[in-house]
């Protein structure tokens, strides 16, 4: 990127960014401030074993994490959960993160945040709000989230975000129960004044994996949705930026999960466990360090869990000799573990995986089921079949 | 129809006076001597020329003036610089990184 006259387009990078302390610092940190959430969406990315409130890091501990993250060279902090606004000290954490120079992103379901609190967060330096929606059909949204009156609250939050001149991303997890409403979801994002829309086909880990048969759309539905996004991208150029997360089960090549293991992103759980990705606890043989007893930079650089699948040296065939080895890094270790029983296998989303045919057949069989199973709602203590 | 549904695409022209929205941060990474653009859930690494353009996007200077200064500085044909500046700013505007 040193051309003088020719202006090359900007490069977006998921690549490790140089920083004062650590040449391989991650770009982003996903901070799960709490696993508490008023919603019970059956595709939640939190682990099935939700961490309890009495194990959560204290305000001072999270603030120290923010300072360490900035020192390490992390650029963006994603304040997530559960529902991060359930933490009464969110303001204190945002304030320290912003002062440390981190780009702060609040990932919220938008049903607990008040106007005053949002204003305060903005004044303290909050840079961006990502608001999730379950559907634009109110009744369906309530059934998916097991929460009444959410959509009206989300609309209200969207208005406040605009009022305070903050950027807004709408995140729409997509599955068989709302995929038909995609055009209306796109309209909703435009109407809310969002700059970005994440059309996030469900990634089947944790609760979503448990509910896969209830959530999987058909291939035809997915193909149709891809067309809708392509058309809308063109029509809404300069108005709405799209992020389209393709479903693994209908893919031919896997995603570079987390931009490569231990490469672009780290995740910290409410109790301070530092993970290479939010589902990493499903991979056996990994030891997870805790920010309570080890420095973040040391964990990132030397932690056993990060070293285990970093780079390409752990790979077996077909990954090892694959020209895409450093493009997709063999996809997702957690998905490989869940579907093939070995985290070092290639992600079954890859067409070169010996498990790929079975992987695709599973999605086709489950999505073709006329009467899918009921949701197993996400809640502490696990797997009940009906909302409270 | 609400105001927001009537948003239209910004088209960058010679007279446009581009600026960075408040939430977009052009930041110098002193440790490695590089510039970064921090945007919602995105990080961009602008090349040298892009940085020179972005530094001049103050909401008061026109694209034409930005290009004139750069053409002199880099001793390059003005028409080429104008073309490249507009195309780069249009791309960034479409990504929400620049407003005008």
Image (tube, rainbow, N blue to C red):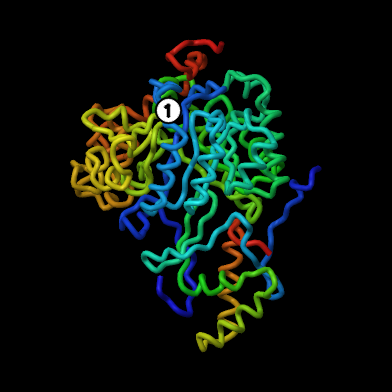
Q: Quadrant of residue A65?
A: top left
Given residues A17 and A251, the one toward you in this image is A17
Where residue B27 sits: x, y (%)?
Answer: 49, 63
Where residue A178 sits: x, y (%)?
Answer: 58, 28
Would you place residue B61 above or below residue A309 in this image?
below
Where residue A277 sits: x, y (%)?
Answer: 36, 37
Circle 1 is placed at which residue position?
A: A56
Residue at 38% in and 53% down = A71
Would you place residue A36 above or below residue B35 in this image?
above
Secondary structure beneath dot 1 equals loop
Q: Is residue A219 visible?
A: no
Locate the N terminus of chain B by quadrant. Answer: top right
In the displayed orientation, state which residue is furthest to the front. A60
Given residues B41 and A222, the one toward you in this image is B41
Residue at 25% in and 37% down = A305
Where residue A238 sits: x, y (%)?
Answer: 64, 56
Q: Is residue A176 visible?
A: yes
Residue at 49% in and 22% down = A42
């Amino acid at each position: 990127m040193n051309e003088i006259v020719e202006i090359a387009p900007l490069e977006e990078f998921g690549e490790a960014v140089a920083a004062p302390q650590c040449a391989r610092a991650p770009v982003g940190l996903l901070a799960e401030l709490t696993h508490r959430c008023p919603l019970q969406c059956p595709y939640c990315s939190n682990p099935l074993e939700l961490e309890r409130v009495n194990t959560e890091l204290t305000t001072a501990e999270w603030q120290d994490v923010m300072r360490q993250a900035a020192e390490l060279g992390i650029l963006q902090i994603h304040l997530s959960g559960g529902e991060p606004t359930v933490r009464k000290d969110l303001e204190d954490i945002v304030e320290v993160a912003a002062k440390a120079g981190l780009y702060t992103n609040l990932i919220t379901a938008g049903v607990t945040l008040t106007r005053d609190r949002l204003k305060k967060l903005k004044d303290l330096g909050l840079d961006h709000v990502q608001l999730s929606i379950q559907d634009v059909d109110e009744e369906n949204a309530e059934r998916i989230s097991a929460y009444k009156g959410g959509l009206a609250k989300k609309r209200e939050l969207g208005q406040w975000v605009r009022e305070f001149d903050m950027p807004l991303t709408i995140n729409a997890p997509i599955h068989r129960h709302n995929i038909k409403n995609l055009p209306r979801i796109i309209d909703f994002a435009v109407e809310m004044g969002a700059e970005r829309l994440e059309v996030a086909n469900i990634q089947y880990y944790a609760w979503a994996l448990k509910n896969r048969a209830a959530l999987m759309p058909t291939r035809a539905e997915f193909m149709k949705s891809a067309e809708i996004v392509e058309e809308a991208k063109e029509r809404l150029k300069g108005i709405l930026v799209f992020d389209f997360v393709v479903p693994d089960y209908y893919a031919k090549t896997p995603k570079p999960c987390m931009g490569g293991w231990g490469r672009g992103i780290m995740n910290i759980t409410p109790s301070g466990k530092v993970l290479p990705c939010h589902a990493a606890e499903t991979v056996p043989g990994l030891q997870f360090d805790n920010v309570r007893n080890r420095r973040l930079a040391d964990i990132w650089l030397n932690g056993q869990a990060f070293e285990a699948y970093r780079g390409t040296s752990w790979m077996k065939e077909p990954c090892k000799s694959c020209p895409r080895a450093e493009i997709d890094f063999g996809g997702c270790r957690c998905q490989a573990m869940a579907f093939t029983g070995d985290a070092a296998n290639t992600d079954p989303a890859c067409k070169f995986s010996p498990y790929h045919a079975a992987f695709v057949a599973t999605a086709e069989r489950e999505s073709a089921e006329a009467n899918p199973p009921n949701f197993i709602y996400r809640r502490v203590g696990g797997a009940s079949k009906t909302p409270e | 129809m609400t105001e927001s549904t009537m948003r239209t695409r910004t088209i960058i022209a010679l007279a446009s006076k581009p600026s960075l929205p408040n939430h977009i941060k052009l930041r110098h990474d002193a440790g490695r001597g590089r510039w970064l653009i921090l945007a919602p859930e995105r990080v961009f690494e602008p090349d040298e020329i892009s940085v020179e353009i972005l530094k001049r996007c103050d909401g008061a200077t026109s694209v034409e003036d930005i290009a004139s200064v750069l053409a002199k500085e880099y001793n390059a044909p003005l028409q080429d610089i104008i073309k490249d500046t507009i195309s780069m700013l249009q791309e960034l505007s479409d990504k929400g990184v620049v407003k005008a």
